[in-house]
Image (cartoon, rainbow, N blue to C red):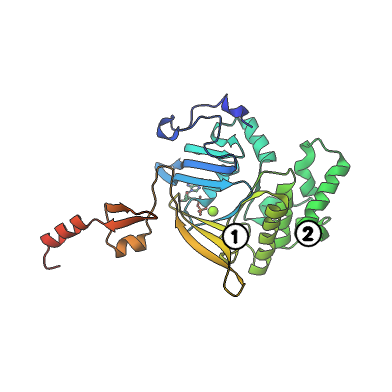
């Protein structure tokens, strides 16, 4: 859907270097479900400015399930709120399912939240209406669908069944466990068949076995219903089960871990994790501080192109100069 493109206001920040592709189409291939390009979010208040996102790049393909990890305050919730259409970026571009989120009208934004992006909060109490049963909560977002009541009821039952909480259909949240409530929240978020499901620490208030049930429900949504899922988590048990974990540091994606199943010589399948540095569209990477410190890499490094890799060396000329100036150190 590209109808927002024609009425797009100038991008926040007045265009400039972030405006590198036309407003009416996402910048990458057709399979990209989420595209963030140099996303910036600055919170201003009381004379203090917080740069929660500082030029964040992110690409998620359709059908992916990825975990987002990072220290408190690194910008995870800020990113999730923008992707959910609850907040807008200060600068940069963000596309989700062919919607340009920086250029939507209030009406388009509402429609986007209703039909394209499902969202799950960490606080179980925030996701469901307390005086409605699980079934009624799931039915609620469907009231705008051109569906007969019988079909809505059927869809609600299928969702509750698929997520393993059919037994909670007629219970209000106070008669459900935290994990059941979160699974009902996932069912509610899926009611209108969204393209993406965004969950901000959905297991943060749960013990580990309950967290596993909730995470399994997200996996089910991904594999059985084909929804693209991005989940923020602190739980290593959760992040170790996803193929792709994206780390965010100081408002930017810094590294990724990709896990792949490999078969060893005895025919056993093992999950191998490999860590990657993020390469942005301008060709920048962030070298891990442990490596740069140990190798005394500071202001500049030397690169050498090899047939199958690029070598990175400390600036030897600077090192020699320094050693020359301070011969006793
Ligand atoms: P995370 O979810 O990774 O813990 P957040 O995205 O919530 O991080 O916050 C990123 C930074 O932005 C933090 O420094 C936080 O204090 C600040 N921040 C978040 N929301 C607001 C807000 N509404 N007003 C001002 N600063 C905020
Ligand atoms: Mg947060």
* Mark 1 crowd level (few <14, some 14–19, many ≥20, 10 Å Cα): some
Question: Residue 168: x, y in percent?
Answer: 80, 59
Is 125 left, or right, of 143 in this rendering? left
Is label 1 within 8 A of ligand 1 (CB to nearest ligand atom)? Answer: no
Residue at the outermost bottom position: 266
Distance Cα–Cα, label 2 vs label 1:
23 Å
Q: Which residue is drawn at 81% across and 49% down?
A: 156
Quadrant position of residue 113: top right
Question: Residue 71: x, y in percent?
Answer: 48, 58
Residue 165 is marked as 2
**Of labels 2 and 1, the one closer to you:** 1
Image quarter where the N terminus lies is top right
36 or 12: nearer the viewer: 36
The secondary structure type at the circle numbered 1 is loop
Question: Residue 245: x, y in percent?
Answer: 54, 57
Quadrant position of residue 234: bottom right
Question: Residue 242: x, y in percent?
Answer: 59, 60
Q: Residue at x 67, y 57 (%)?
A: 219
Visible in this render: residue 133?
Answer: no
Label located before the other in sequence (2 or 1)? 2
56 or 294: nearer the viewer: 294
Residue at the outermost right position: 150
Image quarter where the C terminus lies is bottom left
Quadrant position of residue 215: bottom right
Residue 192 is marked as none
Residue 242 is marked as 1
Is label 2 within 8 A of ligand 2 (CB to nearest ligand atom)? Answer: no
């Amino acid at each position: 859907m590209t109808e927002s493109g024609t009425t797009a206001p100038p991008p926040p920040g007045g265009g400039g270097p972030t405006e590198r592709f036309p407003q009416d189409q996402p910048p990458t291939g057709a399979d990209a479900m989420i595209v963030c390009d140099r996303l910036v979010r600055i919170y201003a208040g009381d004379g203090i400015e917080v740069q929660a996102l500082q030029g964040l790049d992110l690409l998620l393909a359709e059908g992916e399930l990825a975990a987002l990890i990072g220290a408190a305050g690194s910008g995870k919730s800020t990113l999730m709120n923008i992707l959910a259409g609850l907040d807008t970026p200060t600068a940069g571009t963000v596309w989700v399912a062919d919607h340009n989120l920086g250029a939507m009208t209030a009406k388009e934004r509402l429609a986007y939240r209703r039909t394209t992006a499902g969202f799950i909060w960490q606080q179980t109490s925030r996701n469901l209406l307390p005086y409605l049963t699980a079934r009624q909560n799931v039915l609620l977002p469907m009231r705008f669908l051109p569906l007969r009541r019988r079909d809505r009821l059927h869809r609600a039952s299928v969702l509750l069944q698929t997520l393993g909480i059919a037994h909670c259909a007629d219970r209000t949240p106070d008669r459900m466990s935290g994990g059941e409530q979160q699974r009902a929240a996932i069912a509610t978020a899926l009611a209108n068949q969204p393209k993406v499901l965004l969950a901000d620490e959905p297991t943060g208030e749960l013990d580990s076995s309950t967290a596993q049930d909730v995470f399994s429900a997200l996996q089910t949504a991904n594999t059985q219903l084909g929804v693209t899922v991005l989940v923020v988590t602190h739980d290593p048990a959760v992040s170790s089960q996803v193929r792709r974990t994206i780390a965010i540091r100081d408002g930017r994606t810094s590294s990724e871990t990709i896990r792949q199943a490999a078969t060893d010589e005895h025919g056993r399948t093992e999950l191998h994790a490999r860590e990657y540095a993020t390469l942005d569209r301008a060709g920048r990477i962030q070298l891990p501080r442990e490596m740069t410190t140990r190798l005394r890499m500071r202001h500049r490094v030397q690169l050498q192109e090899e047939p199958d890799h690029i070598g990175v060396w400390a600036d030897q000329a600077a090192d020699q100069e320094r050693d020359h100036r301070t011969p006793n150190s």
